[in-house]
Each structure stands twice: as structure tokens, then as C-alpha cells.
Image: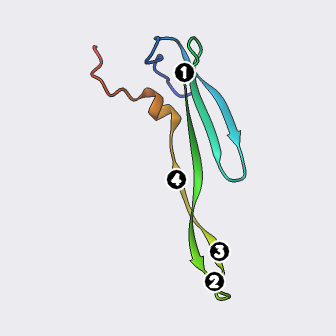
Amino acid sequence: MTPMLKPCPFCGGKARITEVKLLPEAEIMAVGCIRCQAEIKSARQPVQVQRLNICGEWEYISTGLYMEDNAVERWNRRDYHENP
């Protein structure tokens, strides 16, 4: 299902998802305007904690949680009052 995208807040042009990358360390998505090329990117990354192991070395442990930054939600958010 394709998410509903509001028009570009700068020029009113049509928006679309312009990039999706699945990397080992993160998932990256970008939403952008077809007309003026305005773009916003987001990443979904695993949350890790750092701890000292039994040998006295620092190591990273995965928590199983993810830090999310949703490009679609950020693109659609308007901080000003929209006229109906």
C-alpha cells in the first residue's frame, strides 16, 4: 500500500517516495517533490547499548529496539494552520 503524501510545502508539486535502501545497519527512505526536488530522508536504525565486557573491552549489544524517523510523517506534517 502506497502512503498518502501531501503536496510539496514549497511549490505545491506532487510528492513521491524517491529512494528506499535496505542496508545492514539501517533502512533509509526519502520523500521528495517531483517539481522542485525538495527532499526529506529518514532512517530506521537498531538501538544498541555499549557495555564493558568481562575482558575489560567495550562492546555493543543490540536491544532489539529500533530508532525510527519516518520521512512520510515528517513530509506530511505542517507546522502552520492549513486552510480547509
User: What residue sits 46% from the left and 20% below the top?
Assistant: 6
> As drawn, which residue projects farthest toward the bottom?
54
Is 82 placed left or right of 31 in the picture?
left
Residue 16: image x %, image y %?
A: 58, 21
Within-10-Å neighbours for mark 3: few <14, some 14–19, many 20+: few
Question: Which mark is on residue 67?
Answer: 4
Q: Distance between the residues labelled 4 and 1?
A: 24 Å
Q: Distance between the residues labelled 2 and 4?
A: 24 Å
Q: Disc 3 marks which amino acid?
A: Glu
Q: In this view, does 37 lie above or below 43?
A: above
Q: Earlier in the sequence, mark 2 or mark 4?
A: 2
Identify the residue under disc 1. 38
The quadrant of the picture occupied by the C terminus is top left
Residue 72: image x %, image y %?
A: 50, 32
Q: Disc 4 marks which amino acid?
A: Met
Identify the residue under disc 3. 59
Q: Is residue 38 above or below residue 12?
A: below
